């Protein structure tokens, strides 16, 4: 039954996602939850988004009202996939009460659900129960646990991002998910704080190589400068530049698997950008590639001529940690 007290989620949109070699209709929802329990990542502003409930029941009711709004706004039969985000972890019981987790599984039964969570909340009981409630036999893998791994390098994840877990923690969580019938999606962060352009490219190539064959989905997120973050403080001081779109193309071209990428803020000063002339075409091409997996498209974009390409090549060779960034 849909609640009469409806509330818009923090964000929502419909679009296409690539799944099993084809583009499927997808509904994305960002729920206002109880807030991230870690809340220390250097680049994340979502941790400021939280509903300060006085009780678990109040929080569950707040989430229920948002789900009711979604059900009133959209025809769920139009979507094969649903992506669920909060400001932290959907499977954290303190952030999203288990009663609401079960409600989500019931409402989206028969869909492909991708839900984001930190590794510590991916447990056999939690994920197993969600899969059992969600699965109606339509899909071999009805649930994908999405984890913001960011990098396979523990030193980079600790020092540059302050993520609070290890690659070993991620691998244990992935094993748990696979054991109970769920898949795994890894989110990787391209060019976190304190890294040169070349260091970031090397790290991303290494991370993709290590993940190949171990997870079902990989998404690369070129870093954007969000407000009210530690990253923004460095950026305002001229001590950080978001990645070049040329770098994004070079990584996608040689990746050992299909990697989806949506360059949020592409072409803007806070987002991944080149010079402002070639940015729109490249950003659009990267988004098209995420749906088509057409490597030739990436190659054609990388072969484009623009005056900023020589700048990017210079930065890759000459930028050093003690004199970075060389450009804005």
Image (cartoon, rainbow, N blue to C red):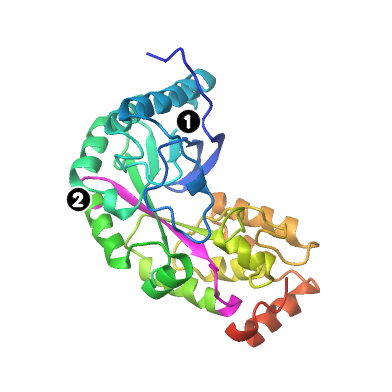
Is 47 included in the stretch rendered in magenta? no
Q: CA distance from mark 2 to mark 1?
A: 27 Å
Front residue of 144 and 295: 144
Place of residue 160 in the rendered image (x, y in percent of width and height, measured from the top left):
48, 70
Place of residue 222 in the rendered image (x, y in percent of width and height, measured from the top left):
57, 61
Screen quadrant of the C terminus: bottom right
Q: Quadrant of residue 129?
A: top left
In this rendering, position of residue 281 left or right of residue 138: right
- The structure residue drawn at horizontal position 40% and vertical position 69%, both measured from the top left corner, is 158
Q: Which mark is residue 79?
A: 1
Element assignment for label 2: helix
Q: Which residue is mark 2?
A: 179
10 Å crowding of disc 2: few (<14), some (14-19), many (20+): few
Is 179 included in the stretch rendered in magenta? yes
Q: Does residue 320 appear anywhere in the picture?
A: no
If you read the primary sequence from the N terminus, does the residue marked by circle 2 or circle 1 appear first?
1
Residue stretch rendered in magenta on the structure? 178-198
Place of residue 135 in the rendered image (x, y in percent of width and height, measured from the top left):
27, 33
In this rendering, position of residue 73 left or right of residue 89: right
10 Å crowding of disc 1: few (<14), some (14-19), many (20+): some
* Residue at the farthest front position: 54
**From what the image shows, is residue 316 above or below residue 99?**
below
Looking at the image, do the residues carrying marks 2 and 1 touch, with CB atoms under 8 Å apart? no
- How many tags in the picture? 2
Screen quadrant of the N terminus: top left
């Amino acid at each position: 039954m849909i609640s009469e007290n409806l509330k818009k989620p923090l964000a929502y949109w419909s679009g296409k996602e690539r799944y099993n070699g084809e583009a499927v209709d997808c509904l994305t929802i960002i729920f206002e939850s109880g807030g991230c329990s870690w809340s220390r990542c250097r680049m994340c502003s979502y941790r400021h988004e939280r509903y300060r409930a006085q009780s678990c029941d109040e929080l569950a009711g707040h989430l229920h009202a948002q789900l009711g709004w979604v059900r009133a706004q959209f025809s769920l039969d139009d979507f094969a996939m649903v992506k669920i985000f909060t400001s932290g972890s959907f499977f954290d019981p303190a952030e999203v009460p288990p009663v609401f987790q079960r409600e989500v599984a019931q409402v989206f039964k028969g869909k492909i659900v991708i839900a984001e969570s930190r590794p510590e909340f991916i447990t056999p009981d939690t994920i197993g129960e969600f899969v059992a409630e969600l699965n109606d036999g339509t899909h071999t893998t009805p649930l994908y646990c999405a984890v913001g791994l960011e990098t396979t390098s523990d030193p980079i994840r600790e020092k540059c991002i302050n993520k609070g877990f290890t690659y070993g923690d991620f691998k244990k969580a992935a094993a748990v998910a696979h054991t109970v019938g769920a898949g795994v999606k890894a989110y990787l962060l391209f060019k976190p704080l304190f890294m040169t352009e070349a260091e970031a490219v090397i790290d991303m190539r290494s991370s993709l190589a290590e993940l190949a064959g171990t997870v079902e989905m990989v998404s690369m997120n070129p870093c954007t400068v969000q407000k009210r973050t530690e990253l923004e403080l460095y950026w305002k001081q001229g001590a950080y530049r978001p990645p070049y779109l040329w770098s994004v193309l070079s990584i996608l071209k040689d990746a050992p698997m299909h990697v989806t990428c949506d360059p949020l803020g592409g072409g803007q000063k806070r987002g991944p950008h080149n010079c402002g002339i070639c940015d729109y075409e490249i950003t659009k091409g990267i988004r098209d590639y995420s749906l088509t997996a057409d490597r030739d498209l990436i190659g054609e974009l990388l072969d484009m001529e623009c005056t900023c390409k020589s700048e990017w090549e210079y930065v890759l060779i000459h930028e050093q940690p003690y004199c970075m960034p060389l450009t804005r």
